[in-house]
Image (cartoon, rainbow, N blue to C red):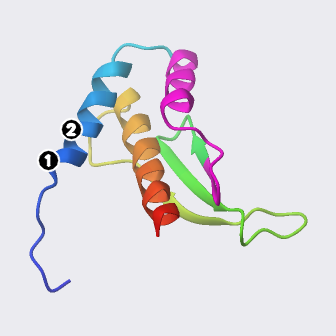
Amino acid sequence: MREQLVEDSRVQGIFLQHMKAVDGLEIGELKKYLIRVAPRDLKKFVLDPYWGREACGVKSKELASETTLPQVCYIGRFGTAPSSNCGIVLSYISAYLLVSWLESL
C-alpha cells in the first residue's frame, strides 16, 4: 500500500449503529436481527456466518460446482475484545459490506 490509511467515519458509523442495536440480545435474536438487516443470500454470494466463533465466510455462487459452494473470504474475530455480540456483528457486517461492494462492480 502506497497511500496512508484513512479512517472512514461513515463505515465506523455503520458498525456503531449495529453494535448498539444488538447490545444485550440473545444469540437467537441477534441472528434474526443480522439476517433482517443484511441478508445471507445475495445475488452472487452467500454469507456463511460462524455464529459461535465471531467469524463470517463468504461463498461464491459463480464459482460453485454441482456439489460445492466455495468459500472465497473469511473474516474473523477483531482485536482482543472479549467474546460478545459485537464480534459477531463486526464480522458479519464486514462480510456484507465487502459483498455489497463486490456486487456493485
User: Which labelled disc corresponds to residue 13?
Assistant: 2
Instruction: Give the residue at x 58% y 38%.
Output: 39
Q: Residue furthest front?
A: 104
Image height check: is 59 above or below 81?
Answer: below
Does residue 93 appear in the picture of this structure?
yes
Q: How would you rate the neighbour count of disc 2 (Cα within 10 Å): few for under 14, some for 14-19, many for 20 or more?
A: few
Q: Which mark is residue 86?
A: none
| Kind of residue sitting beneath label 2 | Gly
Question: Residue at 54% of width from left, 27% of height from top?
Answer: 36
Residue 57 at x, y percent in the picture? 56, 54
Query: Vertical placement of 102 versus 29: above or below?
Result: below
Amino acid under label 1?
A: Ser
State if disc 2 and disc 1 touch (CB < 8 Å): yes
State left or right for residue 42 relative to residue 97: right
Q: Where residue 9 is drawn, which disc sits there?
A: 1
Question: Is label 1 in a helix, a strand or a loop?
Answer: helix
The percent position of residue 59, horizontal first and vertical second, equals 65, 59
Q: Is residue 84 visible?
A: no
Disc 1 crowd rating (10 Å Cα; few below 14, some 14-19, many 20+) is few
**The magenta stretch spans which residues?**
27-47
Say which of 62 and 83 sits in front. Answer: 62
Q: In this rendering, is residue 39 above or below 36?
A: below
Q: Residue at x 42, y 46 (%)?
A: 91
Q: Position of residue 69 (x, y in %)?
A: 76, 62
